[in-house]
Amino acid sequence: MAKDRLTEVLERYEAVIGLEIHTEITATNTKMFCGCPVEFGGEPNSRVCPVCMGMPGALPVPNKAAIEWTVLAGLATECKIAPWSQFHRKNYFYPDMPKDYQISQYDLPFCADGRVVIDVDEDGVEERLDRETADNVTITDDGYAAEIGITRIHLEEDTAKMIHIGGAEGRIAGAKKSLVDFNRAGTPLMELVTEPDLRTPEEARRFAQKLRLIWLALGVSDCSMEEGSMRVDANISLRNHGDTELGTKTELKNINSFKSLHDGLAYEIVRQAAILDEGGRIIQETRHYDVTSKVTSALRSKEEAHDYRYFPEPDMVPFQFDEAFVARIRERLPELPDARKARFIREYGLPTFDAKVLTSDHEMVEFYEEAVAAAGVKNAKAVSNMVLNDLSAYLNTSGLGVLETKVSPQHIAELVGLIDDGTISSKQAKEVFTFMTESGDMPAAIVEQKGMKQVSDAGAIESVVEKLMVQFPDKVAEYQGGKKGLIGFFVGQVMREMQGQANPQVVNQVLADKLDNA
């Protein structure tokens, strides 16, 4: 979807976006209402029992740990925790739910009325034209921050996995064959629903990314979108700028990447605008975004709450949470991404940019913290430079994740220390870093093996400088005549003579002393 086309549409229409983010609670060992293990993959239908298979007479037993993780997620997103809650039956027919209903929550979720603040920098601001006047927006130095309301976080059981087989071999009586794997059925599934406060595809993407960081910080889930443990549904409608009434919405279902979330919404905004421009009417429906064709297509008409015929789950009593329970869960809250970013700026002296980039990647920020712990806080900025420049460049070119390389936080800390104590120069450090990625050897060992130790002995450097002054008397005369920039020429000559192993700081000091007093 061309960016200029999206921007042109957003000049004429206001997009109203709300998200429903489903996250499997992989921190639990068992499913939501039975004792079957929670694991990804495995032989199909090998981790099942009468409860998660929906056998008649099987009774559900709620997973206490899953409920506590959901309450923790609510506290991390500033939600109010309901003192009284209960599960409901959500009735619908589909092969992935053999009971013909899903145990979920309806009007009494565990968590409600929360908020998450997202940052949109200059790369995304052009999609939002009214950012300076919106009530939920605060202008920042490089873009804006938007407060996104959270309607609710509720807990339910996940459905089974459907596998659709196409082609001639998969057709039975003219229809495609579909297989069902119940290993996933019954996994604790936490659903967060936002207010319709998002206005651009970029805001939606950044909200989902921010929420993933929060969940990872809590440890509630591995949030693997590739494996389906985090999935996003997006509701989108258009209206004229200044209108308060919502337009007819469509829903994009089961989006499994941040890029698809952005691109699917962008396509749907442009598609709806084209229909409205021609005087047409938007149909409320559920749509699928195809990442190959980059278009959305209709799946089914959108259900309303009454279509599911909710009623209280008769096999479970309601839940009552007292203040002591909530306080005990609150004690488990770790340092969240925004607080960590503020600490990096306050205690480590990092620029806002460094702190923002580091805390935008859960694995990277954990790596960085471990490296700083080994290198010392005084080297926090030097560690940040190496992580954001050398390490990030290597990860981009190699296609590896930070935990998949031979480079550890201890490697980075030791390499920064070698630069700090003058053992090697920053230029030599880049060579050591390359050797480090290839061999996995520690920096000090590489410096020793390659004979790369930096020469800081002023006497050794003086002898080279004196030799060069004899070799280039004309340059010495020009320098003394006022061409002070020639010191760079002499630095280069010294480094060449000493095969790049001279300490540049000492070289400059010795040269200035010798040339000025020749």
Image: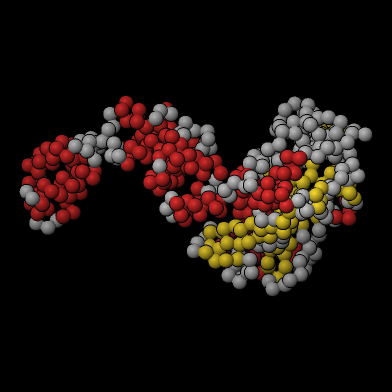
Seen in the picture, residue 295 relative to 35 is either above or below; the reply is below
Residue 200 in picture, x, y percent from top left = 64, 60
- In front of the other: 123 or 67: 67
Quadrant of the image occupied by residue 17? bottom right
- In front of the other: 354 or 494: 354
Seen in the picture, residue 179 relative to 344 is either above or below; the reply is above
**In the displayed structure, does residue 273 sit left or right of residue 315?**
left
**In the displayed structure, does residue 444 sit left or right of residue 227?**
left
Which residue is most to the right?
56
**In the displayed structure, does residue 6 sit left or right of residue 517?**
right
Quadrant of the image occupied by residue 317? top right
Let me know if residue 483 appears in the view.
yes
Q: Give the colour scheme shown.
A: secondary structure
Which residue is most to the front?
324
Residue at 38% x, 35% y: name it: 414
Residue at 68% x, 71% y: name it: 241
Quadrant of the image occupied by residue 266? bottom right
Residue at 77% x, 54% y: name it: 82
Residue 477 in picture, x, y percent from top left = 7, 51
Query: If the image is split into quadrants, where does the N terminus sit?
Result: bottom right
Residue 216 in picture, x, y percent from top left = 62, 43
Let me know if residue 105 appears in the view.
no
Residue at 45% x, 51% y: name it: 347
Q: How many marks?
A: 0
